[in-house]
Image (tube, helix red, strand yellow):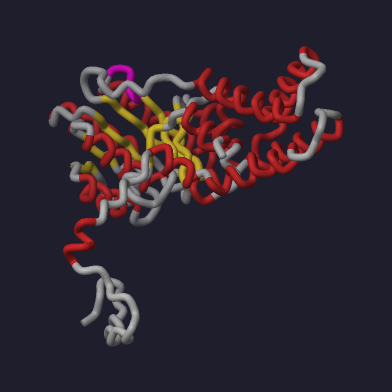
Amino acid sequence: MVTDTGVEPVAEEAEPAGEEAEPTADQAAEAPPEEPASLFQRMRRGLAKTQAGLVGRIDTLLGGRGKVDAELIEELEEILITADLGMQTTQALIAAIEQRMARDAAADPQMVRQVLQQEMSRRLAEVDTPFDLDRPGPMVVMVVGVNGVGKTTTIGKLAHLWTAQGKKVLLGAGDTFRAAAADQLEVWAGRAGVDIVRHAEGADPAAVAFDAAKAAVARGADILLLDTAGRLHTKVNLMEELKKVRRVLAREIPEAPHETLLVLDATTGQNALVQARLFKEAVEVTGLVLTKLDGTARGGIVVAIANDLQLPVRFVGIGEGIEDLRPFEPEMFVRALFEK
């Protein structure tokens, strides 16, 4: 017999005499089932590398220090920068700590940890805005981002998430440039149980957007999720193409696109910040999706983008499963980072 993994199972050996027998089926049934991990526990696991690379290093720095001095501040600044909070956000956090020190001459090193947690929470909360899925008519969500960041997978997972919430979702395969992009999106449409509008490879993306918008209205869709091309190496052409797509959508559905989500790969650190700036300038990005957060120690980029660009993080990827793209909750994110 061959298992699903393609590996033939090893025959079971006879139980050695004198060893404790395996529990019977009845005994196993009596054992309490393992409770599924809470969302907070999953977030903590997903942020384990960032927690070790950021808060773990901060705790090591603060441990054994009796006071907050210039040397501690300098070392803290280096930790924040190398954890991809970036220069602008790092300087803002350091300034907040120094202001606290000026008010409290007896401030101890643990105050530094407390201020950092409070300031990160505040900066994320300040740009956090509701993601309204209940607006009338088809809500159009245009998804942008460079190739390789997980854009197609993100769209599939969003379709699954919103379908599970009772929404009728339609996908538009607007990335007609990349080979097999529409095929990949069609696979995700099947997994999520939603319809897709697609054209042949090389077709005009604006034509796909037009047909997808028409179909969304005709079929009574709640949400139209539109994929787009991500060839950043031809930046000018790409950005002009995206603007054209936006104009076509707005003609067919009032105020569309209602949300423009930029997908970023968290493992790229400061490069993600550069991408966010470029797209924000060109296509009025309204929110971010950060993928692969579970695979990086650079999760500090979440705070950097929110602080530097005043953009909300809408969703984060904390695993590879279809359920592992989660709405971003600033307070939970910071708690998951700082709780021991």
Q: Would you say residue 145 is visible in this rendering?
A: no
Q: What x and y, as percent, mark residue 109?
A: 75, 30
Q: Would you say residue 278 is visible in this rendering?
A: yes
The part of the image, by quadrant, that contains residue 156 is top left
Q: What x and y, as percent, mark residue 88?
A: 70, 28
Q: Is residue 335 above or below residue 157?
A: above
| Residue occupying image coordinates x 36% and y 48% | 153
| Residue occupying image coordinates x 57% and y 48% | 49
Q: What x and y, as percent, mark residue 160?
A: 26, 41
**Residue farthest to the right?**
70
The part of the image, by quadrant, that contains residue 104 is top right
Is-magenta flag for residue 15? no
| Foreground pick, 34 / 264 | 34
| Residue occupying image coordinates x 26% and y 52% | 32
| Foreground pick, 325 / 21 | 21
**Residue farthest to the top?**
103
Q: What x and y, as percent, mark residue 122?
A: 57, 20
Left or right: 66, with 124 as reference point: right
**Residue farthest to the left?**
219
User: In which quadrant of the rendered image does the N terminus lie?
Assistant: bottom left
Left or right: 104, with 131 as reference point: right
User: In which quadrant of the rendered image does the C terminus lie?
Assistant: top right
Chief SS of the magenta region? loop
Left or right: 4, with 98 as reference point: left
| Residue occupying image coordinates x 59% and y 47% | 297
Q: Is residue 320 above or below residue 204?
A: below
- Please report the bounds of the magenta region as a residue range: 254-258
